[in-house]
Image (spheres, grey):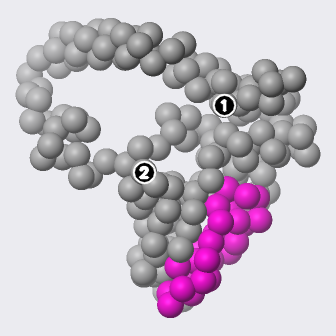
Amino acid sequence: MNKKETSKRVKRIRASYSKMRKKFWSDISEEWLWHKDDPKQKAGFSQIPRCITFIGIIMDKLAKNMKISSTYLALWCHTFDEAMVIIKDQEAMAFESGFTKGERAIYTWKKRMEMLAQLGFIKHAQGRSGPYNYVLILDPFKIIKMHEKDWNITEEPSYKALLERAAEVGADKDLYEDEEEE
């Protein structure tokens, strides 16, 4: 699908959803909705993959017995679309990632960050706030593709669900990239 077709499709979907929303919830005014195109609210948005839930499920399986997806999501919520995060307060990031118990929270958060780096989802650089002061979020589809070759991920229901959702949103080419080039 080219950009023009995608734009038309998005406009059709928006119009359709807008009609349904007004039909189902006619008592809810626009001011109660979070619109990314609203200049008053635009600063509160971050672009995240529409497949983030399936990406999270897969990364948690890759990490075995360690839930890393909440830490990953917290990182995404701190990026400004350039894929980089500057972490000035590790305790705050630990809390936002769901770890709330003092020094143990920071330790647990660092372990999750270490696992995200080991699996290839992030790169990090040392700064005055420690080894995770500067974090780069890599393309999760490319990382999942990399793991697909090493791990029998193709039979996982979560992987199949990711492929299905990616196709729904027009992002499946990113997961089939290598096959199409051959």
**Do we see residue 100 in this rendering?**
no
Classify 154 as above or below 90. Answer: above
x and y percent of residue 130 in the render?
Answer: 57, 87
Q: Nearer the viewer, residue 71 or 99?
A: 71
**Do we see residue 5 in this rendering?**
yes
| Label of residue 174 in the image | 1
Alpha-carbon neighbours of circle 1 within 10 Å: few (<14), some, or many (≥20)?
A: some
Residue at position x 51%, y 15% from top? 2
- N-terminal of the pair, mark 2 or mark 1, is 2
Classify 132 as above or below 6. Answer: below
Q: Nearer the viewer, residue 16 or 108?
A: 16
Mark 2, residue position = 81
- Residue range highlighted in magenta: 106-133
Circle 1 — which element? helix
Examine the image and state in which quarter residue 161 appears.
top right
44 is within the stretch colored magenta: no
Residue at position x 16%, y 38% from top? 38
Examine the image and state in which quarter residue 176 appears.
top right
x and y percent of residue 119 in the render?
Answer: 76, 58
Q: CA distance from mark 2 to mark 1?
A: 18 Å
